[in-house]
Every structure is written in C-alpha cells, then in structure tokens.
Image (cartoon, rainbow, N blue to C red):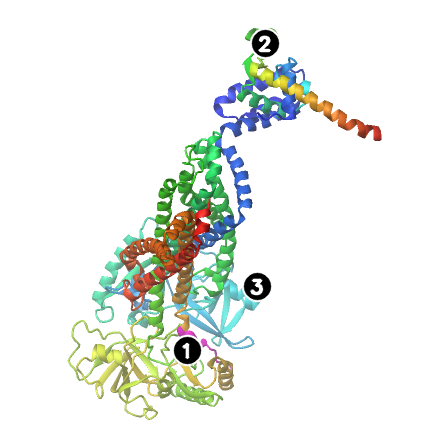
Amino acid sequence: MAHRIIRIASWLVPARLRRDWIMEWEGELAARASPLIRHALGSFVDAFWIRQRDVADLRAIDDLRHGWRQMRQHGGFAYTVVAILSLSMAASVVAFSVVSQILERPLPYPDADRVVTVWERQAATAGRNEVAPGNFMDWRARATSFAKFAAGEPWSYDYTSGDQPEVWRAVKVTDGFFETFGVRPLLGRFFLPNEFTRGNDQVVVLSARLWRSHFGADPGIIGKSLTLDATPHVVVGVAPDDFQPHLLEDVPGGVLVWGARFTVGYEARSRGNGYWQVVGRLKDGVTLAAAQAEMDAIAARVEAENPTTNKDVRTSIISIREHLVGDVRPAVALFSAAVFAVLLIACVNVTNLLLARGAARQHELAVRTALGADRRRVVAQLLVETLLLASVASLAGVVLAQAAMRSLANWGPPEVMWIDSLHIDGAALLFAALLAFGVTVVAGLVPALRLSGFGLQQPGLRTMTADVGQRRLRFGLVAVEVALALILVSGTALLLRSFVNLLNVDPGFRQQGVMVLQIFTGDRNSGAAALRGFHDRVTEKISQLPGVEAVGTARAMPFIESNVDIRGPVRLMNQPPPAPGDDMSNISLNVVTPGYFSVMGIGLVGGRLIEPRDGPDAPPVVVVSEAFANRHMRGIDPIGQRIEVRQFNRPIQAEIVGVVRALRHVRLDEAPRAEVLLPFAQNPVQSLTVVARTAVAPETLIEPAKAAIWSLDPLQTFYRTATLDELVQRTLTTRRFALIVLTGFAALALLLAAAGLYGVLSAIVSQYRREIGVRMALGAAWTDILRLIVGRGLLVSAVGVAAGLVAVLGGARLLQGFLFSVAPTDPLAIGGAAVLMLAIAAIACYIPARRAAAEDPVQALRVE
Amino acid sequence: MRLTYPTALVLQALLDGHHHGFDIMDATGLPSGTVYPILRRLDAEGCVRSRWEKDGVARKEQRPPRRYYELTTGGKTIALDAKTRTQAMAEAGKRLLRPAESES
C-alpha cells in the first residue's frame, strides 16, 4: 500500500528527478519494519513541493493568488477592466450561440443533409418560387436523384366544433412527404398509399402542439373523427414535437395539421401558378450538385414541351438547412463582425489600461527582477493576472449573454428560426472559457512583454526616455480603437440611413387606421351569386359598426402573410404583340371592390376607378396599376384599351378604364407591383380580405367585426386579423432589430475609444506636469497648453479616422445587402460618422487638457 | 534564510547526528510532509548536502540504499545559531510563562 502511494505521488515529480525521488522514499520505507501509511502520504506534499519549484503549472497557482490580491487591492482598475470586457464578451457568447444553436443546429431528421427543398425560379434570378403541380408531377416522374420526392400545399382547415370557429394552418401533403424527412410518428401512423386517392383522403395527422392544446394529449385521439371544413376527418397519427419543417414562411405559429393530398387530372396541366412546396431526399451518393444538374436538364425538357407556361422556368435545389437559415447567414456574419470589432476595441482598451497600470507598477516589477525573477516568470505572472480579470469578465459575460438571449426571444426578429430557444449550453460555456484565454493573450501579451522588460538598469525610475516607446505604443493602440470604432459607426450610419429611407418609402397606400380581416368564404357560398350576396352582407354589417368610415375588399392584400397573388397571362387586344423581353405571361391579377381604393387611399393616375356601376351585368372593365402601364404599355394611352386576361385558364376580356398608383405588396424595399385589378362584382372570388378605414384605433374594432360576421354565419373563420400598420411594421422588425443592435455596438465602440483616448491623454498630462509647469512659468498661455494636448489627441484620432475610412471604403460592399437606397460609400453617412468620431475624440481630449492648462505652474513644478 | 520553528528542529536533528529522512521525523516528531520539503529547501540553499549510502551497507542489510543528509559547514553555522536562538527563545518563553503558572 505504502509503495503504491509513492508510485502515485511520483507522477507529480518532474520526470528527470523521478527515479531518484522514488528510490529515496522506497529506501526509507524499506528501512522500517512496518512502513506507516501516514509517512507515505507525506510523499504527496514532498512531490507537490518539488513540482511547484520546478514546473510552471503549479507556480501559476502562486501567480493566481498574487493576482487575486492585486485585484482586491486595486478594485477600481479591476472593475473597469471587467466592465469593459464583459459587455463585449457577452456579445461574443451570443454571437457564438446564434451560430451553434441556429446556423449549425442539428436538425431532427436522420441524414438531414440529404433532405432538400426544390423550387421553381425564373432564369437569371435566384428566387425560391413555389412549384406548380404540373411541374412537380413531371419532376417526380423523371428525376432519378431522389430516394423520396414529395410536395405539400399550404392549406387551412376550419374547425368549428370548439368554443369559437378556428382556422387551423395545415399542409396537404402528397405521398412520401413524411418519409422524405424520415421522421416517425409520435402516435399512430402517417398516411397510407391508398389514402392519397379520392374519397379516402379524409384523414389527418395532428401536430403534437395541437394534440396537447386541444385534445389534452389524449392517446385515444387515434381513430377519432374531427369535423374539419364541415367534413369528418379521421385522426390517424400525431407528428413528433420537433417536426416543423417550416416550409411555409408565412405561417405564424407553425403548421397544426397535415392532410393527405391526392392529385387530380387537370393539375398535371396546371403550370402557371406555383403554390406547392417540394421536398426530396437525395439518394445515397448523389450530391446536391448532381441532383441540380439533373433537374436543370429536366426543367429544360419541360420548358421545351410547354413553351408558353414554362418559359424561363428553372429549378433550384436548396438543402433544408440552407432553406431554413440561409437567409439569416449574412446578418449573422455582419453581427459577428460587429461583435468582433467591439471585442477587439475592448481588448485594445484593456491593453492600454494594463500599460498604464504597469507604469505604476514599474517599481514592483523592477524589485521582482532584482530579486532574481527571470523575465519568463514575470511575463507569466502578468499574464495570469490578466487571465484572472478576463475570467471574471467572461463569467459576467455569460450571465449577461443569458439575459440577452432571453430578451431576444421577445424582441428579436421573429422570422429567424429557433431564436426563442437560444440559451447558454456547454459549448457556449467552453467558448466563453476559450474567449478568456484569447482575450488574455490579445490584451495582455504586449503589456506583459513590455513591462517585464524593465530591468535593474532602470529600477522604476521615471525618465523621459523610458516612456517614449510606451507612449507611442499607447497612442498607436488608441488610433486602432478609433479606426475600429469608426468602422462600426459608419456601418450604423449606413443602416440608419437605409432605415429612414425605408420608412419614407411610399407604399402607395395609407397604412394608419385600417383594420384587416382575411377570410375564405367558399365553404357555404358556392357560385357567383352566393359569393356576391355574402360579400355584400358582410360589407353592410361592417359599415354599420360605430367607428367604421369605409369598407372595401381585395383578393391580394398588401403586406398580409398570405398575399393571394394569382397570376395569369395578359394580352392587349388591339396592339401588336409585345416586344421580346416584355413578358406578359405572368401578371398579378387582383380582384377588388370600389371601397378598396378609398379605404387604402390609393391615388388615381388617369381615367376612373372601379365604381359601383361596374356590376355583374355592366360591360367588363379593369383598372391597371401605374407600374403595369409603365412596364407593358409604353407609348400607349391605357385608357380605353381592350385587354384579355386569363385567370385559372379562363379568358376575361375587358376595357381598361383607369390607371391607379402601384402598391408595394410584400415589402417596402421591393418594387411596386404591376397588377391588373378586376371588379369583384364581375369576378366574385372566395378569398377575400376585408379592409375598413376606422375613425377609432383599428385594433379595437377587430372583435366587433368578427362578431358582426358571425351574426351572418356563425361558422365563418378568420384566417388572419390585423391592422394594416401592424402588417407593414412586421416587415421592418429585422431591419429595426439590426439597427438597434448595431447602434448599441457603435455606441459602445465610441465610448471605449473615447475612454481610451481620455485615459492615455490623462496619463500623459500627469507625466508631463513638470514640462507643462515649465512652459507656463516661461509664459505659455493656458490656451497654448490646451492646444498642445488637444492637438496631440486629435492628431492621433485623425490617424485612426483615416485608417478607419480606408477600411470602410474598402469593405463597404459587404454591407450592400443590408442597405436600401444608400450607396455603401454614401458620403453623408460615412462623413457624418467621421465627424462624430472626431467630435467625441475632441471632447475626450479636452477634459484632460483643460485640467493641465488650469494647473498652477508652481504646483506643477513642485511635483516629485 | 527563512528559519521557521520546524526548520530549526530539522537543523537540530541533523546536528544531533540523524541523517535519514525518517530518522529526522522520529527525532523531531514532525510528519514526513513537513520534513521532506524542509530538507529540499535546505539542500537548495546549500545548508545540507545529500548523498546515497554506500551500496555495500545496503546490500549487507538486504535493503535498498537510503539517502543520507548531512550539514555543510555553512549549514552547521546556521544550525548552531538556530540552536542558540531557540534556546534563548525557550528561556524567554519559560520566564514569561512562570508568573502565569504561579498565579494559577
């Protein structure tokens, strides 16, 4: 036993001494008749002692103790360093977590990297357009790259058996959809092949969320029948909790139900309008590029076979991960770059503080060196002290990061997938620890090397020559800080200008004081007359609500998530065919009532609006948007032209009676839509969005409006209710968020740079009190002193600003994607940032300069 | 040199002719975890010198060789000095304690 203890303890002893050490202890133990374990245990103390003398790791413990004492003795310094570092470290931890928990999140599908989404796109664009059923069927029949290939159609079921009629967002899926993802049901099963046929498709799979919220997680739900869309549907299964493929970007709250979608004959010919979402699982060994090459060839053949509908229709295959988070990637890159800049500024600041503090510690270090500490020992000691500070900051950073991530769930951009699940995990903790080491090296190495250089020759003496190099270094560091801060401030200024430009975009409508109700009315109103009748009754009911000033209706509602954008080919009947390049095969066709124009405040450009006289029996008319007239009717007076539009392959011939201002339909930063607007009375449709201009706050009328419609039809559901302003603001969240975050970083950077400048100048002022005193005694005016010091500070700042400007102009293009109507080199934004930077620098210089200038020369001379 | 009380005891033991680690422990009553680091420090500071026992001695007694510590000339001076000092301290301590003892 005693011998074993010696062996174990010997691991601590450095290898070159180990043999002798073991021999010594063995020798002593052997000399005893009964070796005492207590004696053997002492060998641990001995081994530790030897290690501490010979090996650096245990010496670090000593340094740590020393560092801790230093930190407690110089609390102000420690707090400052920790405060500076912890904020930027928190931001770094958040950035890391966003990358590891969102961009690189493991997806809940086996071999998730083989799951892809397949989209239509127009040649020469990179869009992700939904797929027309006919194209999907051709692709599925011909493609060999996929082990599974399936589609989903955005759908909704009306559920009217609860307390209130509800809309359940759904996806109707074709055969193989769940198998493409490779998931297993939580309960029951997914669909059987024969359920994808007419008459057998009254089956649904519930999402786990719906199963819990509406059915109390009752396992007996399988086999039960639910009335959806007034038809009984059998629940065959429950999908697992984490199965939310998020194909539909416009579904708030996720998909609640999956239905079975069988395809019918005419759909094989339905190619103009894409509304399906296609997924596939690549066969083993087939790369995404190979699959894309095959799909390119297939798309070309389909185009040749269907030259009118499939002109320039290409495909793009995008991995499911890229589909989910690809759009976020540039923003995360920008965010990370900003975080990195702030972290760097913080490090530089800490370097400066350490140098300043080192100047005060020259004496201590010189004494240590005199007592025989070699340089490596002193460097190690200084680094351990910095590491201690960095670790405390890192810990504080983790706490701050946790708080920041919690608040991201509430006010972060909602379209960022999984943003509400961000948290501190093991990887984030490890990252924070590594960050502490990284910061120690970056911020602490230069001061440690410099400070350890003070030898016996200058035992802490304050000579002018010893400080020159140090002063240059500190000024250089401040210039770096200023340059980095300028980059951040310029970027923020550019984003700010973009945001202001965006807010000033005229969407083509007035967005204040409008209530929006999106409904689908077809279930109990079939046929043109019934649709018209129901619509008229709804309009009348809503008009009677107190506070409602005007009511209108549209099919394609601007800024609503599910903007029912039906398109079709359009032809000018009395004009020569359009020039090549003037593609009129896919024009947006909206259906509106006369009230829509007045509620939305849409301006008339020429001719007249759609009016109540354009009834079912009146001559067919349309109104076109200004964008349509400008793009497709150049040189033609639109008023009075005859036009033929094909909607759902049904031709409608009408006269253009007016031109209205074009609206932006999806986002403020997209071009106004070229559309043809048909009167609802002549073309009644089921998809309606009722808009009402209100004299009171529009959100207060939503519930009364729902009640009014329920008085007409108690089973009517509401697909979406909102205010128009809310819908527009929703599209600005991400930009607003980016702006707020970047403004925060820029402000922090400005503050740190100013603090750095202030600190260095203060130190220099106190170092040069004597010189200043002499100058003043010799007759220098206080303004001269002021000029001297402010001038020096501004010179350094100007160098930093110049370097920053070079970087900004060089790297500005990286920002391009985030800007709107602002050049990445916008002189106003960048010039403004430079001026702001210099102004702040001037203030930071002025305070110490003022103090120096106000000094009594006698006092100054008496120093030392 | 830092002369703690245990160090003084170890020096005393060496002066009294105890040359092996465990013997010094017995003589001073100090545990091995105290004695050995003191010996190492004295060694590093040149107060003691260590060598291995002659092979023959160990072989005759059929055991592994032991390490053998002895005072250097400098160490001897320090040890003697320490002895005087501890004795003086002990005297002073006794004088201080005596009135207290008589009171009780």
- Give the quarter of the image for residue A852: bottom left
Q: How far apart are the two marked residues, 3 and 1, measured between alpha carbons?
A: 37 Å
Q: Which residue is mark 3?
A: A217
Would residue A304 appear left or right of A444 to someone viewing this image?
left
User: What span is colored magenta in the figure?
Assistant: A714-728
Query: Could you tell me which secondary element the residue under label 1 belongs to?
Result: helix
Chain letter of disc 3 in the image: A
Query: Could you tell me which secondary element the residue under label 2 belongs to?
Result: helix
Q: Residues within 10 Å of mark 3 (few under 14, many from 20)?
A: some
Disc nearest the viewer among 1 and 2 = 2
Is A720 covered by the magenta stretch? Answer: yes
The residue lying furthest to the front in this view is: A778
Front-lying residue, A526 or A55: A55
- For the question of whether residue B25 can be seen, the reply is no
Residue A518 in the image, given as x and y percentages of width and height? 43, 78
Q: Which residue is mark 2?
A: B58
Residue A272 in the image, given as x and y percentages of width and height? 28, 72
Residue A365 in the image, given as x and y percentages of width and height? 47, 37
Q: Residues within 10 Å of mark 2 (few under 14, many from 20)?
A: some
Front-lying residue, A735 or A830: A830
Q: Residue at x 34, y 82 (%)?
A: A591
